[in-house]
Amino acid sequence: MSDQGIKSRPSYRPLTLDRTGRRHLLVSDGTTTAGVFAADTTTQDFDERWTISGQHSPLLLPRCAGEKKGVIGSAHVQPSDPIFRDETDLIATLDRRLKTEQIGLRLYATGAEPFLWRVMAVATEAGMGRDEVRLFAGRLGPRRVYCNHCGAIAEGVVANVATCPGCQAALFVRDHFSRRLNAFAGVKIDAEVPGDIPAIEVLYA
Amino acid sequence: MTVQAMLNPTPLKLRVRAIETLTPSLKRLSLASADGKALPPAPPGSHLTLALPLDSGRTRSYSIVSPADERDAYSLIVRHAQRSRGGSAYIHHRLAVGDLVESAVPTSQFSLHSLARKHLLIGGGIGLTPLISFLHELRSRSRSFELHQICRPDEADAFRHILEPFAGPDIYLYTGRAGLDLQAIMGRQPLGSHLYACGPEPLMAAVEAAATNVGWPANALHQESFGASGGAPFIVRLARSGRDVAVGEDETLLEALEAAGANPPALCRGGACGECITGVVDGVPDHRDHFLSGNEKASGRWVMPCVSRAKTDLLTLDL
């Protein structure tokens, strides 16, 4: 049941520099540490590296390694490698930045899947096409699930069945991913045969 | 071949309402609906395929420069090509007000990208014509755009006259390539810009080079080239029948195929739409289209006969 063969399920490959671009901006939520880059790419290939302070894993950026983590405004923090307070702060800054950017920029994001698609949403809003943005989710963790019946979003879903926070329906978590909603579709689990509820499995921890 | 067959499904009947001489080699035609009924709308980027009474029996396509909501007549601007293959010479020397001509329903293979945040239009010479239909649309919808148009010094007044209805700070006219710094203009455009270029091959090549230099995304670059149809003569062999057809230096591969009775499907005749794609069995194509991708061109497996030719003396096609 973990692979439902649904085409909208995004797949991710380690990041490789798009050499047709002229400026390269990497943003990370700091949760992915290994396997982010393909063999031909390193963090030094990017002109800027943005990340978020206070994450549980070490910062992605070698230039910052050994520095005191989470100190915003630290003298050691390079202008090209800003550290943001939290995800909302990073996304808001990225949004303002992209609205004044010129063509030729390529954007890369790594981290938890919901973070990647928040990045994609502001990139799309700024007019960037799919070819100008590359995403890598190191670990397919908990899902955001959209209730197809009432429109509420359940955050952090780890099992194949979730309870809708809006209408309390038991939702089956499909692999059907909406890029616009940044969420997986959840449909009432026994809609076809009332009472027919499969075993609950933890699939997205 | 009958006109009816050339212009499927049903031709439009048009009457020449006006002919305006813009320069010695540029004329603007107004072709009105012959029966007074509203014409089908011509979406931005449309061309009109005319069946002119020429010996060759071939159709000719010209960009429509009137706005999409103008339904009583279509306007065209036609350059008298120095090496006219009949169409533009006929229009310049023989077509008269009151004449009837038949055409196909307008179709567009070169359309505006509706989600673009800004539109950058680059035209060379008569390549302005499809961009004019964009200007109607962009102005009426108050969209953000820039037009950079090159023309010959002796035609500057005529191009100013053509562009007068759209005058504004976002319209730039250059007499010659020297004043146009493509890389600077393209490099300062905001993310989400789409570029539409139409002009002779050297300008298209310069646009492609600048696009590479500034990192312009390939899917936001739209090109339509024209002219440069001639080249060294070669022989095309039709693999299925074993027939050989000579392609002269002044005719296109598609025209030679049609003259020989092999009629591959064709639509835009400008290397844009992909309708005439043909398999290559042997020989090396000289790709001049904007339809095939770089990899597809490099594979040498397909050719677009409407604009492309051969690098080898013999090109064998799957026809």
Image (cartoon, coloured by chain):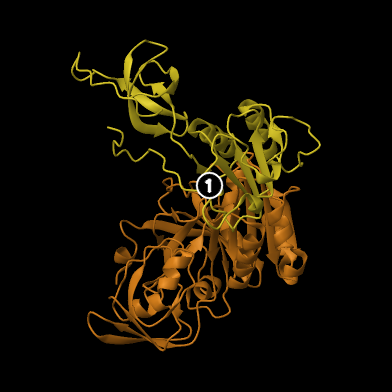
> What's the chain of the residue with tag 1?
B
Which quadrant does the N terminus of chain B fall into?
bottom left
Chain that is yellow in the image: A
Examine the rendering and report whether any part of residue B306 can be seen. no
Is residue B122 depicted above or below B277 in this figure?
Answer: above
User: As drawn, is B74 to the left or to the right of A79?
Assistant: left
Report the amino acid beneath label 1.
Answer: His
Q: Which residue is mark 1?
A: B113
Position in image of residue B6 (x %, y %): 33, 66
Which residue is the extreme one toward the right? Answer: A75
Picture coordinates of residue A180 (x, y %)?
A: 47, 32
B291 and B141: which is toward the camera: B291
Which residue reaches farthest front?
Answer: A66
Taking A111 as reference, is B185 above or below it? Answer: below
Where residue B244 sits, quadrant-wise, is bottom left
Q: Is residue B275 left or right of residue A104?
A: left
Q: Residue at x 48, y 58 (%)?
A: B47
Q: Colour of chain B?
A: orange
Q: Is residue B69 above or below residue A93?
A: below
